[in-house]
Image (cartoon, coloured by chain):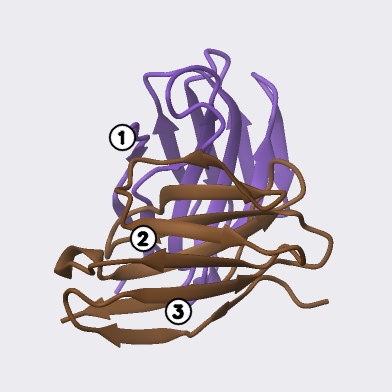
Amino acid sequence: DAGVTQSPTHLIKTRGQQVTLRCSPKSGHDTVSWYQQALGQGPQFIFQYYEEEERQRGNFPDRFSGHQFPNYSSELNVNALLLGDSALYLCASSLGDELEFGNGTRLTVT
Amino acid sequence: GQQLNQSPQSMFIQEGEDVSMNCTSSSIFNTWLWYKQEPGEGPVLLIALYKAGELTSNGRLTAQFGITRKDSFLNISASIPSDVGIYFCAGRALYGGSQGNLIFGKGTKLSVKP
């Protein structure tokens, strides 16, 4: 039973570009959350999707947007990339309170 | 945004030693979760706590949901080399702007004593 899968695993982008990260939730999970983890820090909540709608949002600018598809998979989009957006982006899926994480996408902005 | 205070930031373990770490918050939490993260991987759930005072074990790991609902601790007994990694506490606030979101501490890095 595949857990949460994310693609790509690594990505290098230039300042000002746009990026799309993808996530497939664990089978049976209907809720997807996205987190940003800077080096040496704990994950920070970006937003959560349920029934194809953004249900909650953390303290991130509008440059960060997302989408959830009918099959529960999700995308995270970041526009106008800044150097400070370099981080590990984690997707987590859940059916209740317990989040299961993927291995993340390492984004480097140069 | 709201953060949890997790301590210690790092610690060295010798095989066989017991290890303790804890998390505190200024807000009341209704859920406490403990995760472990190893290099190149996402956090993996170790223990979940849902009631004040709850004490739960998972093998050599024991965690408790504080009575005040503002803290939690994790103990690892008889540590082994594969316990090395970064341990995160995470919780859900009962009230406030971040209500319902899972908030993470900054982690406790466990390393083997040289």
- Mark 1 vs 3: CB contact within 8 A: no
**Residue A5 vs residue A37: left or right?**
right
The residue under label 1 is which amino acid type? Answer: Gly
Q: Which mark is residue B40?
A: 3
The residue lying at 47 percent from left, 71 percent from top is B38
Q: Which mark is residue B112?
A: none
Q: Quadrant of residue A81?
A: bottom left
Residue A100 locus on image (x, y percent): 65, 59
Q: Which residue is tagged 2?
A: A37
- Viewer-side label of 3, 2: 2
- Viewer-side label of 1, 3: 1
Q: Are marks 1 and 3 on the same chain?
A: yes
Q: Which residue is tagged 1?
A: B1
Establish if B47 lies above or below B97.
below
Residue A49 locus on image (x, y percent): 61, 50
**Residue A108 vs residue A99: left or right?**
left
Q: Which chain is brown?
A: A
Q: Secondary structure at mark 1?
A: loop
